[in-house]
Image: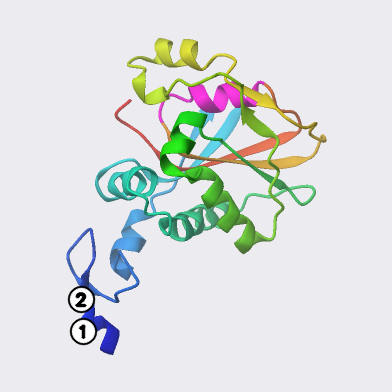
């Protein structure tokens, strides 16, 4: 209580007074969870929310304003999605994540999706597999592509495997699903049963 008086804090969504260590009130956290699915080439993509308003702000601050502590909350969104859809596996899955390009990593000092994956691993007990990497010399950003065709062309050959993957169950994690180009490109180099969970779907693609 004493710290709350010294460091008054408000929910970034509704403005309600909240503890100094939070950034969303309980009600807004509940509203933010809006699960949905997308089918991409016979692969089901599970989404925790939509890339709009509050969720968009959280993702952008997490990725571009060094709000790395948001990773814990975002990983809980994925966990809630995993439980909501009652995703089942024949064996204990490993976690894969979409890596950042070198230029972005140098600017941020961290890989946003990797940070989410680390927290997701903490809550599920599933091991993280770091097999997916960005091809050496690749330095383009998907944000710079304006159309679906441009995205697919730009991302062609972006990802490589730095270690062999077993034929088993994997959970592939990403932040924002827009056209599906990134997920599709990664799926092309993977083997095994891949379950894809993303934080949010960008409906304004």
Q: How many marks?
A: 2
Query: Residue 171 falls in which quadrant of the image?
Result: top right
Q: Are marks 1 and 2 in contact (CB under 8 Å)?
A: yes
Q: Which residues are magenta?
A: 178-188
Taking the view exactly as shown, the residue that stands out farthest to the left is 15
Of 195 and 38, which appears nearest the observer?
A: 195
Is residue 187 in the magenta section? yes
Q: Secondary structure at mark 2?
A: loop
Crowd tier of the residue under label 1, counting other residues whose Cα lies within 10 Å: few below 14, some 14–19, many 20 or above: few
Taking the view exactly as shown, the residue that stands out farthest to the front is 106
Q: Residue 167 appears at what percent x and percent y?
A: 82, 34
Of 15 and 60, which appears nearest the observer?
A: 60
Q: Which residue is mark 2?
A: 8
Query: Residue 68 falls in which quadrant of the image?
Result: bottom left
Q: Which residue is mark 1?
A: 5
Residue 41 shows in the view: no
The alpha-carbon separation of the residues under discs 1 and 2 comes to: 6 Å
Q: How is the image coloured?
A: rainbow
Q: Residue 75 appears at what percent x and percent y?
A: 51, 55
Q: Residue at x 82, y 36 (%)?
A: 166
Is residue 52 in the magenta section? no
Label drawn at residue 187 = none
Crowd tier of the residue under label 2, counting other residues whose Cα lies within 10 Å: few below 14, some 14–19, many 20 or above: few
């Amino acid at each position: 209580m004493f710290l709350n008086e010294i460091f008054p804090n408000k929910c970034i969504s509704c403005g309600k007074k909240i503890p100094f260590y939070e950034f969303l009130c309980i009600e807004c956290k509940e509203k933010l969870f809006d699960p949905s699915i997308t089918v991409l080439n016979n692969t089901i993509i599970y989404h925790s929310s939509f890339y709009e308003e509050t969720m968009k702000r959280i993702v952008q601050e997490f990725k571009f304003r060094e709000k790395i502590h948001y990773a814990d909350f975002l990983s809980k969104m994925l966990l809630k999605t995993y439980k909501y859809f009652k995703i089942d596996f024949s064996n204990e899955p490993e976690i894969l994540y979409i890596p950042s390009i070198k230029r972005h990593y140098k600017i941020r000092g961290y890989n946003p999706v990797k940070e989410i994956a680390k927290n997701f691993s903490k809550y599920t007990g599933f091991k993280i597999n770091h097999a997916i990497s960005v091809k050496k010399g690749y330095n383009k950003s998907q944000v710079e592509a304006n159309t679906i065709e441009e995205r697919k062309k730009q991302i062609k050959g972006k990802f490589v495997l730095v270690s062999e993957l077993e034929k088993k169950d994997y959970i592939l994690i990403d932040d924002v699903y827009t056209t599906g180009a990134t997920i599709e490109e990664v799926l092309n180099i993977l083997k095994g049963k891949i379950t894809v969970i993303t934080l949010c779907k960008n409906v304004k693609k």
